[in-house]
Image: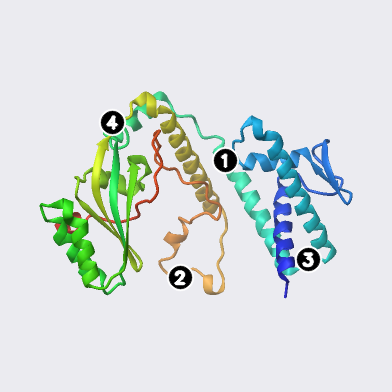
Amino acid sequence: MISTYAVEATAALALVSALALAGCTPGGENKTASQVAAKVNGDQITVQQISLALSRAGSIPEAQQKQAQQQVLERLIDQQLLVQQAVQQKLDRDPHVVAQIDAAKRQILAQAYLERVMQDAPKSTPEEISAFYSQHPELFQERRLYRFKEMAIAAPADLQPLLRAEVIRLDKRADKDKTMARLALWLQSQNVKFQTNLTTQAAEQLPTELIGRIHQMKDGDLLMMPRGNTVLVSQLDKSQSAPLTEQQASASIEQFLQRRKRLDLSSDALKGLRTAAKLEYFGDFAQKPGSAEAAAQPKSAVQPQAAQPPAGDTEKSAGGQGKGYTERDAERTK
């Protein structure tokens, strides 16, 4: 059994493996950067390693660069000390560690290939940006800020049909200003626990699948979203018009379209590779009738960040909306 200390060393070793694949192996003589920042028992830590770590940290103000570099260097020194101990204890030969290093290597190589593929994504034209702006009025010309009264309800599966019926009943009432208070009283009568919250969100902060639906809601309307044994009931308390011009939105639209094009390229590349490859399944994973179509459209083990709707310059607020449906819509479909 590997001790807690050994596990920490293992994690450090796996991270060092990732850095090595990126072209900045700690220790040894094969250095791609000539400038040495420190030595740890003879093993070199280079400026290139520090720069790589900083690049992963995102944008750092110029005034804080020196302090950030020093902090990263100290972390790399700690990391190298752990690595040396791990190697001394032959943890680099432990089957579990070897498997982790191999997994890290495969992940980095796969991601590197996808990054190269996605480099060919063309830039969006002014016509594409203008078309996207026109096609999504709920995000731009008709953009709104929404304030929700939220109630997170501890509702097991057997209670949810009753809760749904009560939400539908309350949503039909004309005096919407008392809806959440009435729902609270009903929950108390059922001995159901709940928590209330008030959130404000702009259209682009909502989940993609709900933007259009919430855009059609009127003040006072309810939205019910089951989440396992919890149900989130949100009432649109108030909405405020906050449109964005095409000029204001163009930069974020361009970034969104670029991410989407990159995702499309990576998906097409993977599909092409699967089509050209000779795939064989064995044992419990052998192909079964009806599974070929599902296998033809896999989810990559390397997932680029999903493209999200472009965001405007809005005040961030706590809370969020999950998958759900309006009870009024659900009733109309019955």
Left or right: 201 in relation to 241: right
Earlier along the polypeptide chain: callout 1 or callout 4?
1
Front position among marks 2 and 3: 3
**Rounded to the nearest whole Å, what is the CA distance between mark 3 and mark 1?**
36 Å
Kindly state the secondary structure of the residue where label 4 is placed: loop
The residue pinned by badge 4 equals 141
Q: Which residue sits at x=83%, y=66%?
A: 89
For residue 244, above or below residue 274: above
Q: Which residue is outermost to the right? A: 42
Mark 3 crowdedness (10 Å alpha carbons): few <14, some 14-19, many ≥20? many
The residue pinned by badge 1 equals 117
Earlier along the polypeptide chain: callout 4 or callout 3?
3
Are the two marked residues, 4 and 3, in contact with CB atoms closer than 8 angstroms?
A: no
Which corner quadrant holds the C terminus? bottom left
Q: Which residue sits at x=21%, y=59%?
A: 181
**Rounded to the nearest whole Å, what is the CA distance between mark 2 and mark 3?**
40 Å
**Rounded to the nearest whole Å, what is the CA distance between mark 4 and mark 3?**
59 Å
What amino acid type is highlighted by mark number 4? Gln
Earlier along the polypeptide chain: callout 3 or callout 1?
3
**Rounded to the nearest whole Å, what is the CA distance between mark 1 and mark 4?**
35 Å
Front position among marks 3 and 1: 3
**Rounded to the nearest whole Å, what is the CA distance between mark 2 and mark 4?**
50 Å
Front position among marks 2 and 1: 1
For residue 165, above or below residue 316: below
Front position among marks 2 and 4: 4
